[in-house]
Image: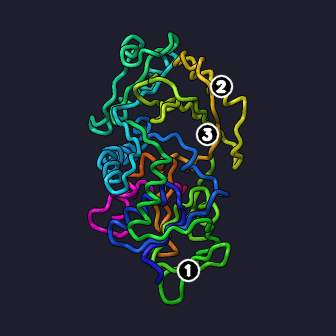
Amino acid sequence: MDGDYAVVGGGIVGLSVAYGLLNLGKRVTVFDEGDGAFRASRGNFGLIWVQSKGLNEPAYARWSQRSAAAWSDYAEELRANSGVDVALQQNGGFDYHLDEASLYARAQQYEALKERLDGDYPFEILGHNQLKKEEPGIGPKVAGAILHHQDGHVNPLHLLRTLAGEVRRKGGEVKTNSHVSSVKAEAAAGYRLTTDDGTKVTADRVVLCAGLGAMTLGPALGFKAPIRPQRGQVLITEKTAPLMSRPSGNLRQVDEGGVQIGASAEEAGLDDRDTLTVTAALAAEAVQIFPALARVKLLRNWAALRIMSPDGLPIYQQSPTYPGVFLVTCHSGVTLSAAHARLLPAWLEGQADAPNLIPFSEARFHV
């Protein structure tokens, strides 16, 4: 065997899993399709986000909380080993509302979830005047916000680069520009992976972290893989003086000083082109929340595709027909990076202390 594990997918999800497996002493090969792939890891919003996760499934809220709680030590470990600061800031995040009705409707949802989590869901509702003390730059049309204290953000490009470097430093192999075209069971044991250029690698186990690529490879390996793309469009401004102290789901000031604005949720298939209609709407809403943005230049914008399951939750599943082949997919790769690196490998290994991921199996899609 060339290795213990082959990880198909070289984005944040795949590299986080590979990093964690290497920490367990496993031999790992990562297949990274290359720049022709839909790269959510290079187009995302960089949030570590707990609020709104798991409104209908508390297990998802708890899983997000476990990952968020691990992020501080995780980021420091990456910095200590690589010398790269992934720019973690985790002093809470805002959910802004432009009318009181939507603010309090969302607060009621959070109160219901908090009860199901035995009170472990630290948030508070800030009306306009209270919010103005926290964020003096907000506009008069902002009715208020929900402040959730477990939220934060990082530089996702620094995270991606650091994980790739650390996987290599720990002895893992990252095969770039390598699209896996087939995975076949070997006669003796393990699996043979073949790439488009004919390269063949064998491994005892396979973890499919290929994002939208799992729509094709997943069913061939016994998974339902009911995932779809969802387009999100993002804008970024020139560097500006500090404008906001905390991120929100649609606004954050990145560590370099620019303001990132987003993010739409569009059912557009595999079309990852940006559109003027959506970017204009995003910009207009951002100016309502922070009027000073009207005087700041936009530098660039892009669209990227999320990986969405029918209910928005991650999917963690071992193939029912190919033992030792796993599907790991989610749309919150940054939030869950710490959990994927520190907790998920125990599940892959079948350890007694592994997290309970049954709520995220494909069994929930049976009808």
Q: Position of residue 326 (x, y in %)?
A: 48, 67
- Crowding around mark 2 (Cα neighbors within 10 Å: few <14, some 14 to 19, many 20+) is few
Q: Is residue 17 above or below residue 57?
A: below
Amino acid tagged 1: Arg
Residue beneath disc 3: 232
Q: Residue at x 35, y 51 (%)?
A: 79
Q: Position of residue 125 (x, y in %)?
A: 37, 21
Q: Total of numbered circles in the picture?
A: 3
Label located before the other in sequence (2 or 1)? 1
Mark 3 to mark 1 CA distance (whole Å): 35 Å
Q: Nearer the viewer, residue 172 or 351?
A: 172
Query: Residues in magenta?
Result: 340-366
Residue beneath disc 2: 281
Q: Secondary structure at mark 2?
A: helix
Residue 239 is inside the magenta segment? no
Q: Residue at x 27, y 66 (%)?
A: 352
Q: Position of residue 310 (x, y in %)?
A: 56, 48
Classify residue 157 as left or right of residue 91: right
Label located before the other in sequence (2 or 3)? 3
Label located before the other in sequence (3 or 1)? 1
Residue beneath disc 1: 192
Q: Nearer the viewer, residue 82 or 340?
A: 82
Q: Position of residue 364 (x, y in %)?
A: 48, 55
Q: Residue at x 64, y 36 (%)?
A: 301
Q: Is residue 96 above or below residue 159?
A: above
